[in-house]
């Protein structure tokens, strides 16, 4: 085990950061752009209610995740006046609309507060929806391709009934920092089940009536109305409650389009960032086959407007107008290059990659396209990709029995998730004339996301230690390290004192020891990845 771990650690070298283009194996040789292809095609899109987009509850749930607001227990000092509140625990919040995703505290701020009137909530009688067929994740697809039996996960615990007591929302619709002159917003009389995300820890889930706010969307669009559905959730962990408020875009765009000769239903929506305009590269673009509405590509970045999609041997780019009323499809005509997984100086035969990469402009999948009509990718030893500089969004790489999960490193030294995205390293450089061989020849290092190097503590303080295995040269992070040649049993609690046991591949989490200044060991434990 120690030798295997040392060997595994030595492998963790050159890496990527990504959400890039859609990639395929060299065997699927995509065209760099045929002169026979039309330059571009423009397709009209219509505005639709977010809840009427599809009869598939899984798709509706995916489109209604919402932009998360900042919440706190105390009033905001910048707000001039709040209404008289009855709740002992009002939830004060702030949502930023039309933000720059890479700039903190950007966008137009709107304040709100959620209150409890004290009226007895109605007895919950949630509507039943047909359970959609579970969609396979990329990791599930990889395990299947490797012949690894999927672990039997414990049965879901029936969540308790909700006790919704928050029934008043005061939102600064006119943006004057005075919440006393805005009409109170009340919960929907009948909440669509697809808007209630059922977790075992969920205690309250309140969806309020739609609100409309005016947001400045820039010179081209000016001030436009933005329609929102506020959703308040309270979850309980280890006896403590945690509240959160999100805002769902109430409308989206939908239409029929074609990529080459293939027909699709397209949905253009704002899920995590509500910008009010649709030409942001992180706008969601979900494509399903016109012949099978439930079929969609699944890889990290496949649902973004800026993703490159491979259809019948040709890559296609997509863009839209700020209002989202037209979708433009263009075939990619640029240079192509080769990405290969190499053994370095190691004697290894099985070398594969699967997942997706990201550049500053686009996202692309890496792997071998399925030929059986499946929606995912299978591992490949090499892929031809549009030329560019990439980083890994998330990739799974196999060196024999060793399986690595890798992404860009979003941590900073002493700052969990504190990496500067503007300085992200795009170290996978795909060029037309020279293959990029990823052979893991650089040694990794351990970076501590917490505590910070110069942070001091008093005796008795509790310290959270979070180590991350990274390649600082390439800006990547090891998210998983697994021995697929061995299996171990896991036993977990599933509620009511019951347990279940299942098998999974052995995780190679390294053991970390902590010593004091005198060299005495004071703590020891495994270091999970990611």
Image: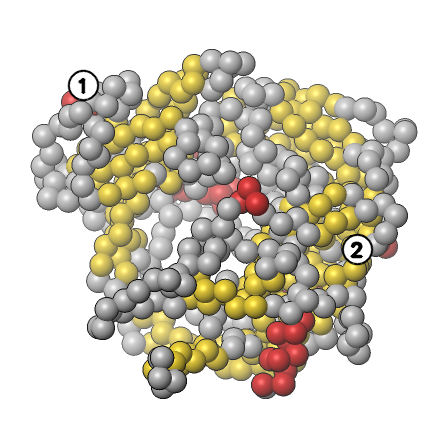
Is residue 293 at all visible to an observer of this figure? no
Report how many numbered discs are placed on residues in the image.
2
Outermost residue to the right: 35
Spatial CA distance of label 1 from label 2 is 61 Å
Looking at the picture, tell me which residue is in the foreground, 342 or 274: 342
- In which quadrant is the N terminus drawn? bottom right
Residue hosting label 1: 181
Closer to the chain start, of discs 1 and 2, is 1
x and y, in percent, of residue 35 in the image: 90, 29
**Residue 338 percent location from the top left of the image:** 82, 52
Q: Residue at x 13, y 27 (%)?
A: 83
- The disc label shown at residue 436, or none: 2
Picture quarter containing residue 355?
bottom right
Choose between 178 and 451: the one closer to the eye: 451
- In percent of width and height, residue 190 lies at 30, 35
Q: Residue at x 83, y 33 (%)?
A: 333
- The residue carrying pointer 2 sits among few (fewer than 14), some (14 to 19) or many (20 or more) residues within 10 Å by Cα, namely some
Graded by Cα atoms within 10 Å as few (under 14), some (14 to 19) or many (20 or more), the crowding at tag 1 reads: some
Specify how the rendered protein is coloured: secondary structure
At 16% from the left and 22% from the top, the residue drawn is 180
Please tell me in which quadrant of the rendered image residue 309 appears. top right
């Amino acid at each position: 085990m120690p030798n295997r771990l040392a060997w595994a650690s030595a492998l963790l070298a050159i890496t990527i950061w990504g959400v890039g283009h859609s990639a395929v194996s060299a065997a699927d040789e995509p065209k760099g752009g045929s002169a026979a292809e039309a330059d571009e095609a423009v397709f009209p899109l219509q505005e639709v209610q977010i809840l009427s987009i599809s009869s598939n509850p899984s798709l509706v749930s995916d489109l209604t995740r919402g932009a998360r607001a900042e919440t706190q227990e105390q009033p905001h000092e910048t707000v001039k006046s709040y209404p008289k509140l009855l709740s002992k625990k009002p939830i004060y919040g702030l949502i930023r609309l039309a933000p720059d995703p890479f700039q903190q505290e950007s966008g137009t701020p709107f304040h709100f507060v959620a209150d409890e009137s004290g009226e007895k909530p109605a007895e919950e009688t949630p509507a039943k929806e047909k359970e959609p067929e579970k969609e396979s994740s990329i990791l599930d697809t990889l395990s299947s391709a490797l012949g690894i039996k999927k672990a039997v996960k414990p049965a879901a615990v029936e969540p308790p009934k909700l006790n919704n007591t928050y029934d008043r929302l005061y939102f600064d619709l006119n943006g004057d920092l005075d919440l006393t002159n805005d009409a109170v917003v009340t919960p929907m009389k009948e909440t669509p089940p697809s808007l209630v995300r059922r977790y075992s820890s969920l205690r309250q889930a309140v969806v309020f009536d739609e609100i409309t706010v005016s947001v400045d969307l820039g010179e081209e669009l000016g001030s436009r109305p933005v329609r929102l559905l506020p959703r308040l959730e309270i979850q309980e962990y280890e006896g403590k409650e945690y509240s959160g408020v999100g805002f769902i875009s109430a409308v989206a765009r939908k239409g029929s389009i074609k990529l080459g000769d293939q027909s699709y239903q397209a949905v253009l929506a704002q899920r995590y960032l509500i910008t009010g305009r649709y030409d942001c590269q992180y706008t969601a673009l979900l494509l399903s086959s016109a012949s099978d509405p439930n079929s969609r590509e699944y890889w990290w970045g496949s649902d973004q407007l800026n993703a490159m999609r491979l259809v019948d041997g040709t890559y296609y780019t997509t863009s839209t107008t700020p209002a989202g009323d037209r979708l433009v499809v263009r075939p990619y005509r640029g240079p192509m290059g080769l990405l290969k997984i190499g053994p370095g100086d190691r004697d290894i035969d099985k070398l594969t990659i699967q997942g997706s990469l990201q550049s500053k402009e686009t996202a692309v999948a890496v792997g071998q396209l399925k030929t059986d009509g499946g929606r995912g990718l299978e591992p490949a030893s090499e892929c031809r990709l549009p030329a560019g500089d990439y980083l890994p969004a998330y990739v799974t790489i196999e060196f024999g029995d060793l399986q690595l999960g890798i992404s860009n490193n979003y941590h900073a030294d002493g700052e969990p998730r504190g990496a500067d995205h503007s300085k992200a390293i795009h170290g996978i450089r795909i060029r037309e004339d020279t293959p990029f061989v990823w052979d893991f020849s650089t040694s990794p290092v351990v970076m501590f996301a917490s505590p910070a190097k110069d942070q001091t503590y008093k005796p008795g303080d509790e310290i959270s230690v979070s180590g991350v295995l990274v390649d600082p040269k390439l800006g990547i992070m090891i998210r998983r390290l697994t021995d697929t040649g061995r299996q171990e049993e896991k036993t977990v609690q599933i509620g009511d004192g019951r347990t279940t046991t299942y098998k999974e591949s052995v995780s190679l989490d390294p053991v970390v020891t902590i010593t004091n200044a005198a060299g005495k060991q004071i703590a020891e434990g495994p270091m999970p990845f990611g």
